[in-house]
Amino acid sequence: MTTEQKKFNGLNGTIMLNTPSNRPGHHYHDITGLTIGSTPGAPYDYKRSLKVTVDIRIEQLDGARETTDHLTIAGPLDFAIQTNVWQPSGKDIVTGGQAHHVLDELDSYTYGEELVRFLKEAADTWHNNGLRAACTHQDDTVPEGVTDVIGWRLDNVPPCPQTGYKYGSKWLIEPLTDEFVRELLKALEDPIEDRRVYVHPDLPGIAGVEEPA
């Protein structure tokens, strides 16, 4: 196995796109990911604006997975995006994880507002598409005022009318569309050119996905 293959080996398959560390051999507390701008520091008790990065990953999963339409597909793509707000020193994060609302609060942009808007929409629509608890035939809308969202869904979402699938009994995958992957590659064109985003040579060839124009 080559060094590059080791570096970009995923947890459940092969990394097809990701945002590597800013420096080789990084530790967790180094600033990692793609710097997309800054956010006001006041909400986090800092006087100055704070750097914001995103970690983006597409992994081609090993083996077969059941989709939200109850089909079986081999080697599907799994997408995840994480947002991090960093201390001024860059030694640790102030907040991170699925804090996608941070993308609405930036006061400067490294690659422009359009990329940030695209990433926010991608996060809201496709984040953890391989961890869907409901199939496409189930309505998991939670009534207003419910605080235990997961518990309510487990107890109240009816079984799938077509297959009897019980909500949350397994993780289903909502397959990424070719259109989304093409748009993602296009949106990340400048960071890819800057070598701030790694793209596996085979990604553009998957299911008709094209190179960024």
Image (cartoon, helix red, strand yellow):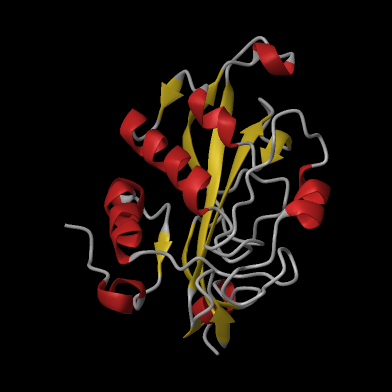
Q: Closer to the camera, 153 or 109?
A: 153
Is the residue 91 above or below the residue 133 in the image? above
Placement of the C terminus among the 4 image quadrants: bottom left
Name which residue lies at 73% across and 64% down: 168
Q: Can residue 62 be seen here?
A: no
Q: Closer to the camera, 114 or 109?
A: 114
Name which residue lies at 83% across and 41% down: 148
In x, y percent, where is residue 174? 50, 65
Is the residue 151 above or below the residue 108 in the image? below
Is the residue 17 above or below the residue 156 in the image? below
In the rendered structure, the answer to whether residue 157 lies left or right of residue 67 reads right
In x, y percent, where is residue 42? 66, 11
Q: Closer to the camera, 7 or 142?
A: 142
Name which residue lies at 49% across and 81% down: 71
Name which residue lies at 72% across and 51% down: 28
Q: Can residue 168 be seen here?
A: yes
Point out the residue furthest to the left here: 213
In x, y percent, where is residue 188? 34, 50
In the rendered structure, the answer to whether residue 36 lies left or right of residue 164 reads left
Placement of the N terminus among the 4 image quadrants: bottom right
Q: Closer to the camera, 208 or 153?
A: 153
Q: Quadrant of residue 85?
A: top right
In the rendered structure, the answer to whether residue 152 lies left or right of residue 4 reads right
In x, y percent, where is residue 84? 63, 38
Q: How many numbered callouts?
A: 0
Is the residue 151 above or below the residue 120 in the image? below
